[in-house]
Image (cartoon, grey):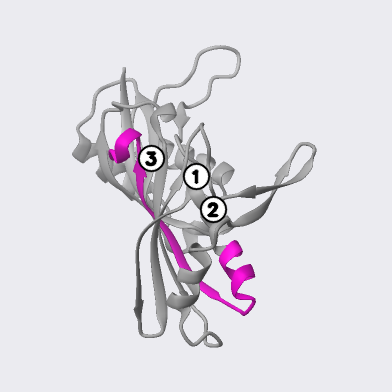
C-alpha cells in the first residue's frame, strides 16, 4: 500500500465541475484506469481520495492537488499515463509524487486574473486606487447573518500589467484552515468599487503555498 499525490490541471470546460462532482469524476477515472486503488474498510468501503484545497466554481487551475492510495506501488510514469487516458476534457494530471505535507500546512494561493472594461479609460489606475484604499470592506455570510469585514490586509499584489486593453493581476490570497479568501470575493469587490461593468475574462489558480510561501506540492 502506498500514498501518492497528483498535481493536475483543471481548465476550460472543466472549471464548471463542482468540487463534489470533481470527486466523483476522479473516482470514475481511477476505476477506468485500472490502477490498483485502495478502498476503505467497513460496511461501506469507498475509494480513498483527498483534495487538500477546494477550488471555486468557474476558476481554472494549473496546480490542483489530489491524494490517493494504491494497494501496490506503481511508477509515476504509469500512473500519469493511465490516469490521463481516463480523465475527461479539461482535466490533466501533470506530476506524481509522495505527500510530504499535510493539508493543514496550506497557508496561501496565487491567482492570475485577466479582465477588461471598455467603459474605464485606465483600468490599471482604477485597480491601483481600489487596492490603495484605507480599507476594503465586504459582506461575509455567517451563521448569524452577514458581517462586514476588511480584506485589505489579506491581499498581496505581486504585479499588474496592461496589454491589449486587458488588465492582468497576479495576487496571493490566504487559503487553508486558518483562513480562506475566494478570488471571486476580490473581483466582486473591485467591480463594486469601479461602479462600471468589468469583464473577468479568466481567473486561474497558479500556485498553492505552505508556510513561508513554499510550494505545497
The mark closer to the camera, 1 or 3, is 3
On whether residue 91 falls in the magenta region, the answer is no
Marks 1 & 2, CB-CB < 8 Å contact: yes
The answer to whether 66 appears left or right of 215 in the picture is right
Name which residue lies at 60% across and 50% down: 150
Q: CA distance from mark 1 to mark 3?
A: 14 Å
Q: Residues within 10 Å of mark 2 (few under 14, many from 20)?
A: some
**Between 9 and 90, which is closer to the camera in this rendering?**
9
Nearest to viewer (mark 2 / mark 3): 3
Which residue is pictured at 33% across the width and 20% down the height? Answer: 71
The stretch in magenta equals 188-217
- Identify the residue at the far right of this view: 144
Q: Residue 142 sits in which quadrant?
A: top right
**Mark 1 or mark 2, whichever is nearer to me:** 2
> At which x and y percent is residue 198?
56, 76
Q: Which residue is mark 1?
A: 25
Q: CA distance from mark 2 to mark 3?
A: 15 Å
Q: State how far apart marks 1 and 2 are (Cα).
A: 9 Å
In this figure, which residue is indicated by the disc labeled 2?
17
Residue 153 in view here: yes
Residue where numbered disc 3 is placed: 65
Coordinates of residue 202 in the picture (x, y in percent)? 46, 67
- Of residues 181 and 65, the one nearer the viewer is 181
Mark 3 crowdedness (10 Å alpha carbons): few <14, some 14-19, many ≥20: many
What percent of the width, then of the height, locates residue 48? 46, 26
Say above or below: 91 vs 45: below
At 38% across and 26% down in the image, what residue appears? 102
Amino acid at each position: 500500500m502506498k500514498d501518492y499525490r497528483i498535481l493536475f490541471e483543471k481548465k476550460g470546460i472543466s472549471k464548471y465541475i463542482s468540487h463534489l462532482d470533481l470527486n466523483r469524476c476522479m473516482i470514475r477515472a481511477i476505476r477506468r484506469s485500472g490502477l490498483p486503488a485502495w478502498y476503505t474498510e467497513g460496511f461501506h468501503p469507498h475509494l480513498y481520495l483527498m483534495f487538500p484545497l477546494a477550488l471555486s466554481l468557474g476558476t481554472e487551475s494549473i496546480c490542483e492537488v489530489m491524494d490517493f492510495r494504491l494497494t501496490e506501488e506503481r511508477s509515476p510514469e504509469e500512473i500519469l499515463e493511465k490516469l490521463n487516458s481516463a480523465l475527461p476534457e479539461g482535466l490533466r494530471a501533470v506530476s506524481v509524487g509522495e505527500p510530504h505535507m499535510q493539508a493543514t500546512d496550506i497557508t496561501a494561493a496565487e491567482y492570475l486574473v485577466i479582465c477588461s472594461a471598455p467603459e474605464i479609460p485606465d483600468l490599471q489606475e482604477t485597480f491601483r486606487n481600489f487596492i490603495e484604499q484605507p480599507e476594503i470592506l465586504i459582506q461575509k455570510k455567517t451563521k448569524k447573518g452577514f458581517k462586514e469585514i476588511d480584506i485589505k490586509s489579506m491581499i498581496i499584489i505581486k504585479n499588474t500589467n496592461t496589454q491589449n486593453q486587458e488588465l492582468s493581476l497576479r495576487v496571493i490570497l490566504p487559503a487553508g484552515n486558518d483562513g480562506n479568501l475566494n478570488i471571486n470575493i476580490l473581483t466582486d469587490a473591485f467591480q463594486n468599487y469601479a461602479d462600471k461593468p468589468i469583464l473577468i475574462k479568466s481567473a486561474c489558480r497558479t500556485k498553492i503555498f505552505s508556510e513561508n510561501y513554499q510550494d505545497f506540492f
